[in-house]
């Protein structure tokens, strides 16, 4: 069951790309925010290809969603950072493939795409951070710490 409604009010200008103007969560849903995900392999290697980095970023996001019992339909908002306009075409190509699978009905999460001069490491070309609704509580495991910092 999807707990996020994606809306594009008729009073707003139509979205210029694959995103929705509004994402509204339902009920008493817990909201999770994830740090910027980068395109690294399990061996912590970074590909020089923007397309491969994009595939790895979306795979990392899907893993984070699954860890909380969520699916792509539970995404609320994404912030996509792309180094250099020259990497936008490769990013869009892979993003379109992923979105065709994740959002077959064309209801996309809110997303802002920014072209930037660089990221934390010069080999990183794509980074995506965001938030999603956790549809069911997942108990903290020892590997996640499950603690809060109230200090």
Image (spheres, rainbow, N blue to C red):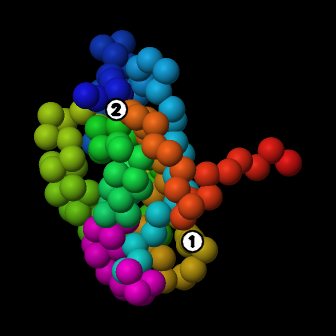
Query: Residue 119, percent across and down?
Result: 57, 71
Is residue 56 within the magenta segment? yes
C-alpha gap between disc 2 and disc 1: 26 Å
Q: For mark 1, does the 10 Å Cα neighbourhood hold few (<14), some (14 to 19), or many (20 or more) residues? A: some
Residue 27 lies in quadrant = top left
Which dot marks residue 119?
A: 1
Q: Is 55 displayed left or right of 118 in the figure?
A: left
Asked whether 67 or 94 is in front, the reply is: 67
Question: Can the viewer see residue 114?
Answer: no
Q: Is 12 displayed left or right of 130 in the figure?
A: left
Q: Which residues are magenta?
A: 42-57
Q: Quadrant for the N terminus, please.
A: top left
Q: Residue at x 26, y 57 (%)?
A: 95
Residue 150 lies in quadrant = top right
* Residue that carries the numbered disc 2 in the rendered image: 20
Asked whether 128 or 41 is in front, the reply is: 41
Residue extending farthest to the top is 11
Whichever of labels 2 and 1 marks the residue nearer the N terminus, that label is: 2
Asked whether 111 or 147 is in front, the reply is: 147
């Amino acid at each position: 069951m999807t707990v996020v409604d994606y809306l594009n009010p008729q009073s707003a200008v139509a979205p210029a790309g694959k995103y929705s103007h509004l994402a509204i969560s339902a009920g008493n849903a817990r909201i999770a925010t994830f740090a910027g995900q980068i395109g690294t392999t399990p061996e912590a290697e970074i590909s020089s290809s923007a397309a491969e980095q994009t595939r790895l970023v979306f795979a990392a996001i899907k893993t984070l969603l699954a860890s909380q019992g969520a699916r792509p339909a539970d995404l609320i908002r994404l912030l996509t950072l792309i180094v250099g306009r020259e990497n936008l075409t490769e990013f869009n190509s892979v993003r379109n493939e992923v979105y065709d699978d994740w959002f077959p009905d064309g209801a996309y999460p809110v997303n802002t795409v920014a072209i930037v001069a660089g990221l934390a490491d010069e080999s990183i070309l794509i980074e995506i951070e965001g938030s999603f609704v956790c549809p069911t509580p997942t108990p903290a495991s020892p590997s996640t710490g499950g603690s809060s910092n109230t200090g």
